[in-house]
Every structure is written in structure tokens, then in C-alpha cells.
Image: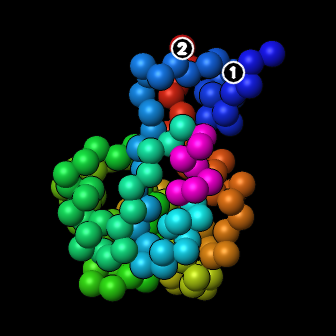
Amino acid sequence: MKSCTFLERIWFGRTVSTSEHRPRILIADDHDDFSTLVKAYLAPQGVAVDTASTGYEALSLATQVVYDLILVDIQMPGLDGYQVTTRLRATGYDRPILAVTAHAMAPYLDEALRAGCDAVYTKPVSLSVLRAAILSSVAPTAP
């Protein structure tokens, strides 16, 4: 039996060829250890990952590259995750934006949703939970 990645299995049980779309995500987080860990975890599973360490860098990348999903930290230098999300939504960016934050209090979570985030995850977040959220957001629709 052919070995396949998690990404290939989640896409409705069919093998994804190299000619098909490879999901591309942006991780915007000022903590390099978080970005590095998530990137190292997702890249072998067929996900192209770019990183940004400031809100301004995230906004710049997101307006130059078409991302299937953006994972944004709420508390970053320069522009915070709320501001990045609000500005991206104002430009018409309509793909998923998932927020990650160390702030687990309801007002912070509500503010992220009001800013336009599709979901909010509190740190520390399980890699398996994060992987499932990301891949379900970028998985193609069933034929």
C-alpha cells in the first residue's frame, strides 16, 4: 500500500498529485519558536508555509501573495492581530483567518471574531488541533 501524507488522506481519501494546488498559509507570530514548530509540522504534509514576525510584515506579505489561510497571533509588535485582520478584510480578503492568542479571556476572543477572524485558538494549542483546523479550512470541496 502506498504511503501518503495526512494532507492526502484528509482530502476525501484521494491522493493529491503534485500538479494539484498545494495549500499555502501565512503564520504571523512574533514568537519564532511557535512559527518554526508549526511550519516544521505542516511542511512535510504538503503545506507551503510563510512566516511573518510583525503585523506590518504580515500585512505586506498577505497583500502580495495569495494565501489559502492566515494564522495570526493577536499580540504582535507594530500592528496587532486585530488590526491585521481588520485591514485584510477591508481589502476584500475572504479566505480563512485563524487567530491564536495567549489571552483566553472572553473579551479578547470576542474582539478577534469582531475583527474578522474565523476562529480563535488559545495558546498553548495542540498541534493536532491546529493541524485539523488548518487542513479543514484549506481542503478542497468534494467532487
Residue position marked by numbered label 1 in the rendering: 13
Q: What residue is rendered at 64% in x and 18% in y?
A: 14
Q: Secondary structure at mark 2?
A: loop
Percent position of residue 103, x then y: 57, 84
Tell me the residue that label 2 is attached to. Answer: 143
Residue type beneath disc 2: Pro
Q: Is residue 14 left or right of residue 55?
A: right
What element does badge 1 sit on? loop
Marks counted in the figure total: 2
Q: Is residue 14 left or right of residue 61?
A: right
Q: Which residues are magenta?
A: 39-45
Query: Mark 1: which amino acid?
Result: Gly
Q: Residue at x 25, y 58 (%)?
A: 61
For the point 53% across and 57% down, the residue is 39
Residue 65 location (% of width, % of height): 25, 48
Image coloring type: rainbow
Marks 1 and 2 sit apart, C-alpha to C-alpha, by 12 Å
Name the quadrant containing residue 21: top left
